[in-house]
Amino acid sequence: MRLTINGKSHEVDVDPTTPLLWVIRENVGLTGTKYGCGVAQCGACTVHVNGLPVRSCSIPVSAAVGAKITTIEGLATGKTLHKVQKAWLDHDVPQCGYCQSGMIMAVAALLKSNPKPTDADIDATITNICRCGTFQQVREAIHMAAKATA
Amino acid sequence: MTTKISRRTFLISSAAVGGGLALGLRLPPFGPAVARAADGSPEITVWVAIRPDNTTIIRAVRAEMGQGTITGLAQLIAEELECDWKGVSIEYPTPGQSVARKRAWGEFSTGGSRGVRQSNEYVRKGGAAARMMLVQAAANEWKVPASECTAANSVITHKPSGRKTTYGKVAEAAARLEQPKDVPLKDPKTWKLAGKPVKRLDTAQKVNGTMTYGIDLKLPGMLNAAIRDCPVFGGKVKSFDANQVSGMTGVKKVVQVGDTAVAVIADTWWQAKTALDSLSIAWDEGPNAKISSADIAQTLKEGLDAEQTFVGNKAGGDVKQALAGAAKKIEAVYSYPYQNHACMEPMNATVRWTPERCEMWGPTQNGEGAFAQVLAASGLAADRVDVHNVMLGGGFGRRGTYPDDYVTQAVLIAKQMPGTPVKMLWSREDDMAHGKYHPVMQCRLTGGLDASGNLTALHMRLSGQSILASVRPEVLQAQKGRDPLTFQGVFESGEHSLNYTVPTLLVDHAMRNPHVPPGFWRGVNINQNAVFIESFMDELAEAAGQDPVEFRRKLLSNSPRGLGVLNAVAKGIGWDKPAPAGTFRGVAQMKAFDSFVAAACEISVKDGNKVKIHRIVAATDPGYAVNPAQIERQIAGSFVYGLSALFFQECTVKDGRIEQTNFHQYNSMRIAQMPKVESIIMPTGGPIWGGIGEPTICVAAPAVLNAYAKATGKRIRSVPLKNHGIQLV
């Protein structure tokens, strides 16, 4: 099977029912995307598939063949961080950081479809679990990123 | 599968190599041996090495799991060292290196909110001594008295002549000097870097996916293992047929792990897990296979009337007599459930075992505890094993060390694949089924009021599980069977003492230890004790016809700092004015881990069961505040952890095993439910430093429970609220 991840093409020899998450982590070797629950509850595994946020633990790799997949490693443009990453850095959002790849990918997708989200929009869209409890900083950083131009 | 060595792995490997150097194996031609950092930079003191380019390596052995400890400790060292903060990087000496150097770095264990508070003095001295040695080395070179030289931003200046040099230039000479014995420390009031809200040192890698957690480790030739442990605690493996799955794609070996578990080793973890799911394992479920939550609750209930107890706090005369003579007597029974830590990163460890050497790479809150487990399970001598800690994807007490836990399992698996590194990873389901659970506890509180509504007598009877009986039995032996930790927050003295003064008081514990393994769950026993006593304080205040803040103030006459945080949140929430229309307020205060904490909240309740938390004001007096920005984040996060526990979380037992398998049955707060948290950080100094990561968590639940009682007239006395049909919206 051929996958396009962060603009690069990867040939992988796996069972087609393997969840996309595990192919990204184990076969392609990109470990920024995290495993948290395996049942699409926590969002730690969020990647973009054709620009839309997807919980990669719960779709088979076969469903992603031919799609444009973006992981946290591909969110920046060269050395220029995505505005969400920059806001996260400026606002010192992560604590343990384990859920933050998925959180950042979910927020980047939100800002693409809704560049100036209200608190209610954030509440309705961002449903990732963070056990450290960074939500207060996440919310503030989303508004910061929405104000950024780049 | 990939065999690429990540940058982090490379750093770990080179740190291991550097370990040899750090053990003093590289001897200079004359003079004392110079120990070195992984990159060869000279070590000035065990906490500081200086690179030739004048940047600073700060050593850390406490674990970073998000709580910001490493940044805080680095601030304290850099403050005394007077180094350039921009050039600071962190290096983690291993437990093996520490053992070889007579525990040069002291305690590795990171629990009990001790990371900063209990190492602050020796790490500051490590920074200050290094500064003195660097300055002395420059003074020696210039042949001037050290007292004429000053240091700032990694630059040393000889004031009279204006000559300057850098730490980098004198580091080799400084490393050869004897460490001074008399090392004065700065007055915290003069701090320039410590005490300031500087940014964390580890954020950049956490926003671009490059931070390596245990689950991400890659070692050359590494295989992956999935494991299934007997679902019933106390059960064993009866039989399994490896041939059933040994031909499946990627599978390398099927092994038994100790008496209780079976693991499949494969090229990838997904292959290992898939094969394990297809393997039928027959279990000998053992003596606990019929036990349910109802049985456990009944056992605890009997303890509420037990004759034999352990006393944790006692004042005045006979409490029963005092209660009998009270003008008014109030009684209530509370209970607290089993809860799982549910770290975002499930338990894992990567181990390579050969008959000559065994190493573990993985997340642990206690490097030395993990070292002891590797030592025991590997069967090798102490100079042949080591542990390499990595960033933890959450800890919360789960990654402290417990007997026969994930580290031991990973060693027992790797031992059956000599020479091959094996990464063992639990699924979320494994993590839910094999936790070290927040212990169960019931509590009967009986209070007596006099005719004026003063609390004259209080009996707090705890009945339930002791963590230490399970994981540190030697402490109980020394205490004649008592578990002092059970009384956190209501104890007679020390870091967890009761703030209230009650004329006649008895806090006692009927120990009842069910078969479910307990553990240290962020905050540990302050969580249930705060729910019990702080809810009951409101019940007493109501019975006395008094305002709950006013009622507490009278009992805090001997706790000025407890009174301080209570007054701060009362002022912050505007307690002296009515709450906004439709909202109701609650408060709670506690002393825990030598910090004083309080919370006040404003909630509204729709249809009697939909709770919206509008505002929380939280105050903490930790004595000293090393990084206020990180403290603020720990406080806000404590409400996420504590309120998730209050509203959603219970692990129930059926047929001897835990029923909940994943987040759909064990929910955690989302951003939509997150209240606005206003933090008041009010350090009052003094000789004792308090903790940060855990104390605040315990006031979250009782503050909300008290507000809920005000809003609805209904007092809830058991956690979680979902069992009462109450939702968090």
Image (cartoon, coloured by chain):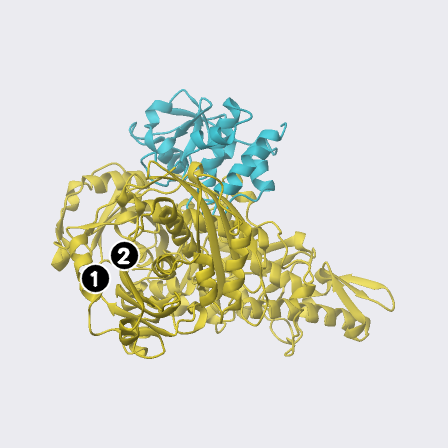
Chain colours: A cyan, B yellow
Q: Are callouts 2 and 1 both on one chain?
A: yes
The residue that appears at 30% across and 56% down in the rendered structure is B436
> Reading the chain from its start, which is encountered first: label 2 or label 1?
1
The residue that appears at 21% across and 53% down in the rendered structure is B261
The reply to whether residue B676 is visible in this rendering is: yes
| Identity, as a three-letter code, of the amino acid under mark 1 | Leu
The chain that hosts pointer 2 is B
Point out which mark residue B168 bears: none
Q: Secondary structure at mark 1?
A: helix
C-alpha gap between disc 2 and disc 1: 9 Å
Picture quarter with the C terminus of chain B: top left
Q: B289 or A46, which is in the foreground?
A: B289
Point out which mark residue B300 bears: 1
In the image, residue B554 lies at what x, y percent?
46, 66
Q: Tell me the residue that label 2 is attached to.
A: B335
In the image, residue B699 lies at what x, y percent?
43, 55
The residue that appears at 28% across and 52% down in the rendered structure is B718
The reply to whether residue B68 is visible in this rendering is: no
B62 sits to left or right of A64: right
Q: B34 or B215, which is in the foreground?
A: B215
Q: Is residue A19 above or below residue B220?
A: above
In the image, residue B160 lies at what x, y percent?
87, 69
Dot 2: few (<14), some (14–19), or many (≥20) neighbours within 10 Å?
Answer: many
Picture quarter with the N terminus of chain B: top left
- Quarter of the image where one finds residue A25: top left
Contact check, label 2 and label 1, Cβ < 8 Å: yes
In the image, residue B37 lies at what x, y percent?
58, 61
The residue that appears at 68% across and 66% down in the rendered structure is B172
| Identity, as a three-letter code, of the amino acid under mark 2 | Ser
Q: Secondary structure at mark 2?
A: strand
Dot 1: few (<14), some (14–19), or many (≥20) neighbours within 10 Å?
Answer: many
Q: Is residue B504 above or below residue B516?
A: below
